[in-house]
Image (cartoon, helix red, strand yellow):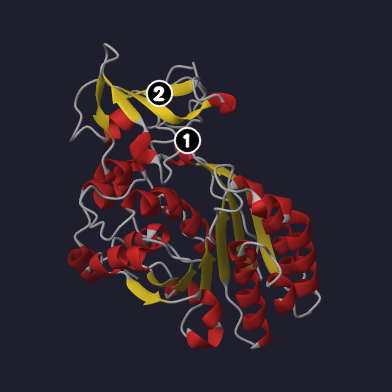
Amino acid sequence: MSLVPTSVSDMNPHIVDLFAGPGGLDVAARWLGVHAEGIEWDSEACKTRREAGLVTREADVRQFQPADFPHANVLAGGPPCQTFTVAGSGVGRSALDRVLELVDAMGNCKDVTKHIAHFDDERTGLVLEPLRWALKALSDGEPYESIVLEQVPSVLPVWEAMGAVLRKRGYGVAVGILKAEEFGVPQTRRRAILIARLGTSAKLPAPTHQSYRKGVPRGLGDIVLLPWNTMGDALLATRNYPFSVVSNYGTGGDPKARGIRRSDEPAFTVTGKVSRNRLIDANGTLIDRITSAEAGRLQTFPSDFPWRGRDVAQQIGNAIPPRLGVHILAAALGRTEGIDEEFFARVIDGGWHQRALSEAPAYAH
C-alpha cells in the first residue's frame, strides 16, 4: 500500500536529525524512503553511522544553524538524556525549573546563551537546542514544516513548554508519553514525544499493540490491538529455547531485588548497561549475557545492522527504537497508512542491506 502525503511539501521531506546517535530515527526514515542527515558529536557512534551508510556530520549541533541545511524541512532531535534520566546523575531534573524559565525566555525572543553556560553539566542545556533551531528557522522565513523531539519521560515538562511556544507561532502540537511495547517493540520503554506540524493539527501515533502489564497473560487486553511482542520472538535466531533475563537494576533501589522477565515477555528497557543483565535457563542456571547484536535486535534494529566503534552497548541504549521511530515520523508527516506488521517484517527481518534500501526505499515517492 502506498503512503499518501497530506501536503505537496510532504512529497519530499528532508530531515535534519540533531543528536542523531547511531541512527535509530535515521534508520526509520530510510525505511520510509525519507532522506535524513544526522549531526552527531560522538565519534564512536559516527563509525556505526558511516558503516551503515547514513548521511552524517560529525560535529556539535551548536556549531550550526538551519541555513547550514537549506533543504531540510523536518527538524528532529533527541538531546543527550544522561542528566535527565533516572539512571543518570539527575542534574537536569534539579535544573528543570531553570530550563523551563529559559524556554519561556526564548519564546519571548531573548538571548539565553550566557545562562545556558551556567549549567553544571553542559548536556543539560543541550535540550534547548531544538527550540533554538526551530525559532531561528522561523525568523529566517524558512520554518520547519514538521518537528519531532524525543527524550526520557522526565523531560515531558520541557516538551510541553516548547509546545506552547510553537503553538503561538502557528504549529499544531501534540505532546505525551509513548510506550514502546504498544508499537511492537519487544521491550518496555517509555519516551516523552513532541510532534509539531506547521499550519495544521498534530497528534501522536495511536498504539498498534497492547500494553504490557506484569502478571497479565499476553493477548489479554484491547482485542482491537495486537498482543505485545516478546524478546523470545525477537531473539529466536540466536536463542530458540526458553530463558529469562535478570535485570542489572534492583527494584526500588534494592540490589537484591532484581527484576526477572521471561522470554515470552517484552525485555526490560535496553540501556547502555544491557550487557550486565544475566540470562538464565528454565532451571535457573546462568547461561551468558545478551550480545550487542541481540541488544540491537531488542531495539528493533535489523540483526545485521553494522555496529562499529567502542561502547556499542551504550550506542544501542541511547538510540530510539527504529520501529517506534517509524510510527512517530509517520504521524509527523501525515503518513500513517501502510505501517503494519507486513511492513516491519519486510524492513526489519529482511536485514539492513543499505544499498538496496537506498536505491529502492520501502516507500518511494
Q: Earlier in the sequence, mark 1 or mark 2?
A: 1
How many neighbours does mark 2 have within 10 angstroms: few (below 14), some (14-19), or many (20 or more)?
Answer: some
Q: Is residue 8 visible?
A: no
Left/right of residue 132 with respect to residue 361 in the rendered view: right
How many neighbours does mark 1 have within 10 angstroms: few (below 14), some (14-19), or many (20 or more)?
Answer: some
Image-quadrant location for residue 172? bottom right
The type of residue carrying mark 1 is: Thr
Q: Residue at label 2? A: 261
Q: Position of residue 87 (x, y in %)?
A: 54, 42
Q: Give 343 or 161, whichever is nearer the viewer.
A: 161
Q: Position of residue 190 (x, y in %)?
A: 54, 42
* Dot 2: element: strand
Quadrant assignment for the C terminus: bottom left
Left/right of residue 213 with respect to residue 346 in the rendered view: right
Q: CA distance from mark 1 to mark 2?
A: 11 Å
Left/right of residue 78 with respect to residue 50 in the rendered view: right
* Dot 1: element: loop
What label sits on residue 335 in the rendered view?
none
User: Residue at the spot x=35%, y=63% of the render?
Assistant: 45
Q: Residue furthest top?
A: 283
User: Residue at the spot x=53%, y=59% of the render?
Assistant: 80
In the depicted structure, whether residue 36 falls above or below residue 3? below
Q: Position of residue 135 (x, y in %)?
A: 67, 77
Q: Position of residue 63 (x, y in %)?
A: 53, 82
Q: In front of the other: label 1 or label 2?
A: 2
In the depicted structure, whether residue 83 falls above or below residue 206? below
Q: Is residue 326 visible?
A: yes
The type of residue carrying mark 2 is: Arg
Q: Residue at label 1? A: 188
Q: Give 329 or 337, whichever is nearer the viewer.
A: 329
Image-quadrant location for residue 100? bottom right
Image-quadrant location for residue 310? bottom left
